[in-house]
Amino acid sequence: MMNKRIFKAKRVANADVSGWLDDHAVIVEDGVITAVEPSSNVSSARDSYEIFDLGDVSLLPGLIDAHSHMHCSATYDAQSLALSENDQQLTIRATNNMRKAVLAGTTTIRDLGSRNEVAFTVRQMINDRHVPGPRLLLAGTPITITAGHCWFFGTEADTEAQVRTAVRTQVKLGANVIKMMATGGMFTPTANPRTPQYSVEVMKAAVEEAHRMNVPIVTHTLSAQGVRNVVEAGVDQLIHARWYHADPNKGLDYTPDTVKKMVDQGQWVDPTIGHHLLGVEAKQRGEVGPMDPHWAVSFKVVPEEEHLDKLTKMHDAGVRFTTGLDMGMAYGTHDRSAANAWAFVESLGWSNWKAINASTAGTAEALGLVKQVGSIQEGMIADLAAFAGDPAQNIRDMDQASTVVQSGRLLKLSDTVLV
Ligand SMILES: [Zn+2]
């Protein structure tokens, strides 16, 4: 028998995710949205539908986050836990994290680096509905150099031949995207965030191999030379896109020509500023534990304003931004994807609707899912998140969803968890 439901709300996001439809009803049949119409016009022909009147809430498409590490703890000791925990511990942690994420209203997540044994298992169990969780696009393990960034849950590959094998292996396991650590990172004591990990030639081989197998490739990129390398190599998206100078006594090394090429090539960027915002707030609350500053960046601390200035320059030049909380890194808890939008508004000065759009339809486009999720209109999968208040007025009203619908299935209704 067909599963037929109607979700009514005082505010429903329009098809472009750019404004509200007042007092509208979303008609869902077998997990797909079949109509959006004024609540007062719902025809008596729909008498057999189950009706959920959500009342004075803001109904958005389920949020989409382009950057998670499902099994990382999001605590100040996330690094030592990731280094020491076994697959069983990480699997339980990942299962719990993915449950929290979807119950907060994030119905689609792209995981950009977790152990293969954990990531593919957790996705299978979510898809088989043994545990609740978001729709998952997976990279599986990130590809990194020996002792490189996140080697402890990555695939180590140094040479062009090794990198090609690593790409093929991830696709064979079921990866939807390839994640490469193009530079060192803050999370890894043996990696230098200020220098590239791969030459342009090796990066080009990875790009060629990923594209030959029809999957996109995205890169963790903190150093300026790393950014220039991956732009030259033609990767699909950049994560962080920070511009650290190779010399630890210097700050940033921004090159506008590289950004122009980035725009010409249509390369999206996940600026991970929601994660930075949560870190600053954790500090203000006195919750920051004994994290050691990384040896390679401790010489000269670059103020956050300088990073934001570079992000603004990139965005003004035409670079499009995805969400991407870097869930699992310190203070980036998996239930806080909404902080991406908070940071777009509060740190970059975007309008609330522009930030809401980026958190839904925009990132759906970046993930190649725009015909399936990211907006509330006929033909889309019924992924919905309702928030008390009005995020178009106050972006922080978008936080923990009170109602979550995934593929038409109710996971949470008016703050009551049903799964
Ligand atoms: Zn990450």
Image (cartoon, rainbow, N blue to C red):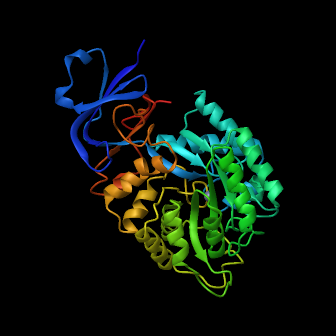
At horizontal 53% and vertical 51% (from top left) the residue drawn is 66
Q: Is residue 298 visible?
A: yes
At horizontal 52% and vertical 80% (from top left) the residue drawn is 303
- The residue at the far top in this view is 1
Asked if 51 appears above or below 77 in the picture, the reply is above
Q: Measuring from the top left, give residue 194's x and y in whole percent.
A: 68, 75
Q: Measuring from the top left, give residue 362's x and y in whole percent.
A: 42, 51
- Residue 39: image quadrant is top left
Q: Is residue 283 visible?
A: no
Counting every numbered tag in the picture gives 0
At horizontal 71% and vertical 74% (from top left) the residue drawn is 195
- The residue at the far bottom in this view is 249
Q: Nearer the viewer, residue 349 or 99?
A: 349
Tell me: 144 left or right of 315: right
Q: Measuring from the top left, give residue 252's x and y in whole percent.
A: 58, 81
Asked if 143 appears above or below 225 in the picture, the reply is above
Tell me: 69 left or right of 163: left
At horizontal 78% and vertical 47% (from top left) the residue drawn is 86
Asked if 49 appears above or below 305 in the picture, the reply is above
Q: Quadrant of the N terminus?
A: top left
Quadrant observed for ligand 1 in the rendered image: bottom right
Q: Measuring from the top left, give residue 213's x and y in whole percent.
A: 68, 44
